[in-house]
Image (spheres, rainbow, N blue to C red):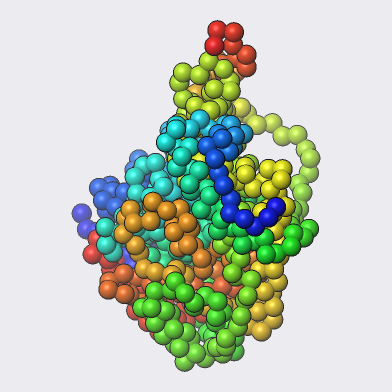
């Protein structure tokens, strides 16, 4: 069978419109590429339902229905996002085999637009991690070097898109979990403004930071996906009513007149020198493309990681209280009382990082420590938001490295939680402020991808996508393929 | 709270684990005592700031109507539980004289 995989959603659309490819052939090609699961990117493949959905779409196209922009897109869905009747494990043993009775809004929207889900994507347990190594189902590998991590927590989503095992994927981002793996795997990833995309159906981790977003091979693809995903949802009381712009139509407006800020605090100690060079070169290119570039300062960034690792565990300790072996998921055997059932189930079936964060959250929220940690973290949050607001009076976007280093070796940071947390130092401030941000490929260091992070003002996704698109089109990073290969 | 380094004794971890309903092994207790100390020492830099009451982000943007809607799939919720009868989830007793 010919390998019907593509370098972008737009290439897929041309092939479908010209009848060169049937949706069934395309979906079958991606299923074939995905089924060896060489990178351990998938927790499950949904072959039967995917092929059925593909055939159903082909039937409608044959009867004259016009394909939409996302018709036939083979899609991976991160396993912390509920999918009706399809196992949703959150990368955890405690939800092994759990089949939700409903689908998340973002899933319903994308499937309604003609995307075909081909499987669920492996991730750090309950979205807690920066490498994929906290999954109870084994780590995912980076297709650029299989001895290295793909990043996390949307590890499978990023690796599979990079390797051509799916054409687009859904991830979630709470402290960088879309952007960081996108950077380490050389793909595009967007975290929308908080509230831009519905959280209904996301297994909650940090309710005031979580957002779902797309991971794709190109900026235009990400724009198409975001357009379909965004919008008000009455089932998420924090979702925004603001109308959704035509992100894709606006892409080619160019960057002349856009003002770009370079915050000096993101270029300090800990940044790998070659990563710095790639990012600085990219900034130079934005300048040549017509953006106005200037240095800015965000002094309260120094507190961002600390604030994150107080607020996040606090909300985690509350959100994960529901995993108690009573109503869903697995239950540990041998309990004689209800109390023992909770202790054995949670102690036995939750992983180390999850337990760490639950206990940390319990600690910082407890009497005697609440002021010293939780309230000061909220004060830091306020200072961080003010710094960003002030910066966005002078500029339209900020540009930084997405990560301090390229992909690190598997098992190199698992002994020291703090060292792993430092991988998120450039991404967490964005979630704290609720702003939109994206990562786009900007080069390679010894064969490993480097990501450029663009941060926007509240609901500033259009400007980010325009900048990212102009930069991408002036380069060819997105057409490089990892050794684990993708066609198209 | 002063800014001296945090200390997590075995007893402290056991207390947190009990509050969070987590049964831990002896090795886990020692491991988490070390790791939590490192993390709390790092986040202690927040104490350079003064606590202030702020408006939270993630404000509720809209409320929907408080209307009753039938959901016919309640049976699915029961059958998702690890141990159930036809219309009830089964759990061990709160008090168990045999335990």
The quadrant of the picture occupied by the C terminus of chain B is top right
What residue do we see at 40% from left, 59% from top? A151
Quadrant of the image occupied by residue A486? bottom left
Q: Position of residue A251 (x, y in %)?
A: 52, 77
What residue do we see at 57% from left, 17% from top? A337
> In the picture provided, is B28 more to the left or to the right than A476?
right
Q: Position of residue A145 (x, y in %)?
A: 27, 62
- The one of A422 and B61 positioned closer to us in this rendering: A422
Against A242, residue A470 (above or below) is: below
Against A215, residue A396 (above or below) is: below
Against A358, residue B78 (above or below) is: above
Tally the numbered discs. Answer: 0
Q: Can the viewer see residue A206?
A: yes
- The one of A205 and A356 positioned closer to us in this rendering: A356
- The one of A6 and A78 positioned closer to us in this rendering: A78
Q: Can the viewer see residue A308?
A: no
Q: Position of residue A187 (x, y in %)?
A: 39, 67
> In the picture provided, is A393 more to the left or to the right than A188?
right
Q: Kindly give the residue lying farthest to the top in the view shown.
A: B98
What residue do we see at 45% from left, 32% from top? B25
What residue do we see at 44% from left, 87% from top? A285
Q: Position of residue A34 (x, y in %)?
A: 30, 51
> In the picture provided, is A297 more to the left or to the right than A223?
right
């Amino acid at each position: 069978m010919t390998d019907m995989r593509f370098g972008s959603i737009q290439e897929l659309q041309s092939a479908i419109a010209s009848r060169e490819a049937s949706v069934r052939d395309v979906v079958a090609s991606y299923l074939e590429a995905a089924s060896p699961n060489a990178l351990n990117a998938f927790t499950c493949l949904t072959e039967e339902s995917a092929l059925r959905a593909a055939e159903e779409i082909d039937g409608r196209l044959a009867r004259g229905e016009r394909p939409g922009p996302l018709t036939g897109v083979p899609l991976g869905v991160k396993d912390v996002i509920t999918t009706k009747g399809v196992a949703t494990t959150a990368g955890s043993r405690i939800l092994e085999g759990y089949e939700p009775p409903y689908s998340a809004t973002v899933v319903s929207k994308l499937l309604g637009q003609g995307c075909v889900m081909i499987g669920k994507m492996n991730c750090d347990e309950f979205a807690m991690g920066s490498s994929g190594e906290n999954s109870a189902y084994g780590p995912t590998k980076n297709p650029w070097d299989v001895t290295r991590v793909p990043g996390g927590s949307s590890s499978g989503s990023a690796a599979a898109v990079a390797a051509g095992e799916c054409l687009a994927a859904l991830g979630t981002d709470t402290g960088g979990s879309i952007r960081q793996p996108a950077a380490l795997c050389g793909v595009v990833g967007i975290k929308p403004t908080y509230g831009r995309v519905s959280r209904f159906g996301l297994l909650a981790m940090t309710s005031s930071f979580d957002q779902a977003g797309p991971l794709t091979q190109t900026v235009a693809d990400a724009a198409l996906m975001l357009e379909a995903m965004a919008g008000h949802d009455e089932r998420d009381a924090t979702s925004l009513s603001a109308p959704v712009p035509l992100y894709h139509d606006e892409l080619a407006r160019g960057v002349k007149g856009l003002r770009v800020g370079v915050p000096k605090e993101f270029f300090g100690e800990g940044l790998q020198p070659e990563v710095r060079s790639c990012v600085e070169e990219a900034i130079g290119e934005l300048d040549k493309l017509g953006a106005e570039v200037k240095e800015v300062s965000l002094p309260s960034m120094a507190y961002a990681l600390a604030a994150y690792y107080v607020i996040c565990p606090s909300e985690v300790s509350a959100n994960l209280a529901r995993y108690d072996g009573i109503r869903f998921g697995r239950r540990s055997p041998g309990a004689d009382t209800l109390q023992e059932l909770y202790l054995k189930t949670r102690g036995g079936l939750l992983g180390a990082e999850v337990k760490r964060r639950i206990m940390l959250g319990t600690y910082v929220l407890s009497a005697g420590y609440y002021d010293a940690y939780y309230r000061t973290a909220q004060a830091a949050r306020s200072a961080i938001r003010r710094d960003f607001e002030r910066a966005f009076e002078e500029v339209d976007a900020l540009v930084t490295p997405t990560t301090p280093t390229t992909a690190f070796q598997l098992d190199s940071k698992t002994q020291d939680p703090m060292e792993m947390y430092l991988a998120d130092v450039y991404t967490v401030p964005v979630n704290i402020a609720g702003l939109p941000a994206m990562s786009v490929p900007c080069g390679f260091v010894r064969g490993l991808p480097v990501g450029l992070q663009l941060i926007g003002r509240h609901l500033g996704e259009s400007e980010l996508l325009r900048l990212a698109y102009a930069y991408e089109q002036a380069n060819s990073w997105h057409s490089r393929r990892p050794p684990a290969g993708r066609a198209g | 709270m002063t800014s001296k380094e945090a200390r997590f004794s075995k007893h402290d971890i056991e207390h947190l684990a009990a509050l969070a309903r987590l049964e831990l092994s002896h090795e886990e207790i020692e491991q988490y005592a070390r790791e939590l100390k490192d993390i709390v020492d790092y986040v202690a830099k927040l104490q350079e700031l003064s606590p202030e009451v702020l408006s939270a982000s993630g404000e509720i943007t809209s409320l929907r109507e408080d209307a009753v809607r039938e959901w016919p799939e309640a049976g699915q919720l029961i059958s998702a539980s690890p141990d159930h009868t036809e219309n009830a989830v089964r759990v061990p007793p709160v008090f168990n004289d045999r335990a």
